[in-house]
Amino acid sequence: MHADSDSAFLVPLRSIHGLSQMVLRTDVAGMPLEWIDYREAARLYYQEQIAYTCGSPLHRLYGGVNALSGRRTVLEVSSIIATVGHTGNPGNTRHDYVPPLNNETLFRRDAYLCMYCAGRFASRELSRDHVRPFSQGGHDVWTNVVAACRRCNNEKAWRTPEQAKMQLIAVPFTPTYAEYIFLKGRRVLTDQMEYLLAHFPRHSPLHDRIARWLS
């Protein structure tokens, strides 16, 4: 950051990937925490909460002009920033942490594939299927739900896969916190993806699913 003023009113004049591109925030140990926008990133820079940065340049923000030197505040925001202070990663502090379940992250976990016919579909063509239905004691949890196209979901109906003579192509699983952060990303850049992949469990099903998703 090149600064001759303490202006907090930074405005974006150049953004490589567009202003909607989110920044990946980590703790000082490098554990992924959350996605933040360029405004929140600028606030952290201004408050000197950035321990270090990595990844690629993402946004260039311009502030006020110093009356004495005539120089303008310029802030380069990287795609990945590590912040000081205590970790806010519940995956580190709570061993029983389970990410919240919603269709958006579920469909991304399953790479937009129907877990019965293996076809790839748009979000609007997928539904949340309960492997063991509620009527048979099933619960609305990560390990009991899969993405299913509407045809397969209707065919399976209130039955288990065994009862419907339908086979799952993969076993449903609960994402770790790092996996969940990836699944929440609306548009994940290559360097951000590589960073998050390094924090996935070695045998995470997402390694193969992401490769298939990108193919």
Image: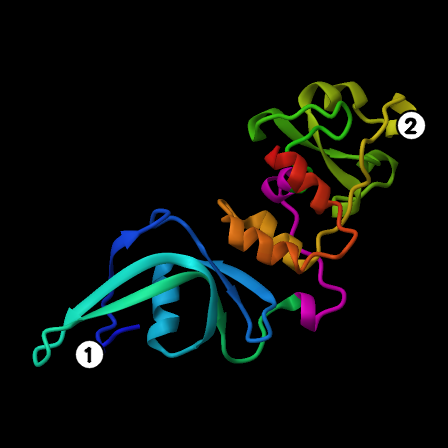
Which residue occupies the foreground of this view, 116 or 98?
116
Distance in Å between CA atoms under marks 2 and 1: 69 Å
For residue 212, above or below residue 10: above
Indicate whether residue 94 is drawn in magenta: yes
Q: In the displayed structure, would residue 128 be above or below residue 198?
A: above
Quadrant (top left, top right, bottom left, bottom right) of the N terminus: bottom left
The residue labelled by disc 1 is 4
Judged by depth in the image, the label closer to the viewer, 2 or 1, is 1
Disc nearer the start of the sequence (2/1): 1
- Give the quarter of the image for residue 158: top right
Q: Position of residue 86 (x, y in %)?
A: 56, 79
Q: Is mark 2 in CB contact (under 8 Å) with mark 1?
A: no
Q: Amino acid at mark 1?
A: Asp
The span picked out in magenta is: 91-108
- Estimate how packed mark 1 is, as few (under 14), some (14 to 19) or many (20 or more) residues with alpha carbons within 10 Å: some
| Residue at the image position 47 percent from the left and 73 percent from the top | 52
Q: Is residue 79 magenta?
A: no
Q: How many marks?
A: 2
Q: Amino acid at mark 2?
A: Glu
Label 2 belongs to which residue? Answer: 162
